[in-house]
Image (cartoon, helix red, strand yellow):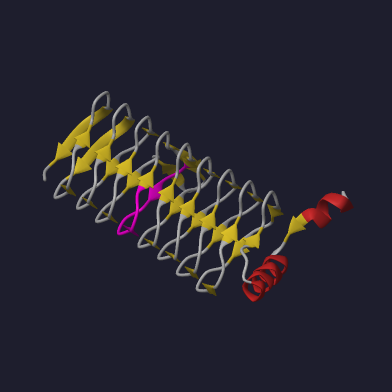
């Protein structure tokens, strides 16, 4: 039991690793670590953060933080909330196969490169309203399902209101148990929703897609589209 306890990374341990990485000009490495809970909100972090295959026993907070390089969450498990509201990432958000067990908030985020959410699984909701992405968003096989909490039910919704994506958004083979709200989205490449399943309504009022929109094989309760 003591050995297990010593392997858990706490806030002070993470802070120490980040300071060392900044001083040494490398990424802060939390690969395959178990982390109790981490709050790095409102920080300027002058290195990349590598949480590949990490397990968070609680939440991860990076709201309003500035990260100079990549944020890597590939294969990570967050057992509570993942809050990235108004984050600024200098390079890429790399998070394929990420598992979040109580909602992912990216509202107002700015990403200097691409976002990879391929086969990511979110319980609750995923909100990317007002996000600005210089590159593509790969969300192939993304899965969002509902969540029962003490305060009620979360329907498994995906929000992209007023998002700005300079390349493309690929959501082929995704599954969203609730609604998908893309009101006012701007995509300067293509939108791919082929073979996706949406349990609720797809809303695309006042949206702009510069190239083609692919809906072949898509299933949804209702589609409300106006360009």
Residue 226 percent across, percent down from the top left: 11, 43
Residue lying at 47% horizontally and 66% vertically, measured from the top left: 63
| Viewer-side residue, 193 vs 64 | 193
Residue range (magenta): 123-136
Residue lying at 47% horizontally and 36% vertically, measured from the top left: 119
The answer, for residue 51, to whether it is visible in the render is yes
Q: Residue furthest top?
A: 217
Q: Is residue 174 above or below residue 6?
A: above
Residue lying at 61% horizontally and 49% vertically, measured from the top left: 52
Q: Is residue 194 above or below residue 211?
A: above
Residue 65 percent across, percent down from the top left: 48, 69
In the rendered structure, the answer to whether residue 79 lies left or right of residue 197 reads right
In the rendered structure, the answer to whether residue 199 lies left or right of residue 64 reads left
The answer, for residue 145, to whether it is visible in the render is no
**Residue 127 falls within the magenta-colored stretch:** yes
Q: Residue furthest right?
A: 2
SS assignment for the magenta stretch, majority: loop
Query: How many marks on residues?
Result: 0
| Viewer-side residue, 163 vs 180 | 163
**Residue 215 falls within the magenta-colored stretch:** no
In the rendered structure, the answer to whether residue 3 lies left or right of residue 97 reads right
Q: Quadrant of residue 227?
A: top left
Residue 177 percent across, percent down from the top left: 38, 33
Q: Is residue 88 above or below residue 105?
A: below
Q: Residue furthest left?
A: 227
Q: Residue furthest front?
A: 25
| Viewer-side residue, 125 vs 217 | 217
């Amino acid at each position: 039991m003591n050995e297990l306890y010593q392997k858990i990374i706490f806030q002070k341990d993470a802070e120490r690793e980040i300071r060392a990485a900044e001083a040494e000009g490398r990424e802060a490495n939390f690969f395959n670590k178990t982390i109790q809970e981490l709050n790095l909100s409102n920080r300027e972090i002058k290195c990349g953060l590598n949480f590949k295959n990490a397990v968070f026993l609680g939440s991860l907070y990076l709201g309003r933080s500035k990260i100079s390089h990549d944020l890597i969450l590939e294969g990570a498990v967050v057992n509570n909330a993942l809050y990235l509201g108004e984050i600024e990432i200098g390079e890429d958000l790399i998070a394929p196969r990420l598992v979040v067990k109580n909602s992912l908030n990216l509202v107002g985020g700015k990403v200097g490169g691409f976002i990879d959410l391929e086969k990511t699984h979110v319980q609750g909701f995923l909100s990317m309203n007002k996000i600005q992405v210089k590159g593509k968003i790969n969300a192939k096989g993304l899965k969002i399902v509902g969540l029962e909490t003490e305060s009620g039910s979360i329907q498994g919704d995906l929000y992209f209101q007023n998002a700005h994506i300079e390349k493309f958004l690929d959501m082929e083979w995704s599954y969203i148990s609730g609604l998908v709200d893309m009101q006012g989205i701007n995509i300067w490449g293509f939108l791919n929703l082929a073979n996706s399943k949406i349990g609720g309504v797809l809303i695309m009022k006042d949206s702009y897609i510069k190239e083609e929109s692919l809906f072949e094989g898509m299933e949804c309760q209702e589609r409300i589209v106006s360009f």
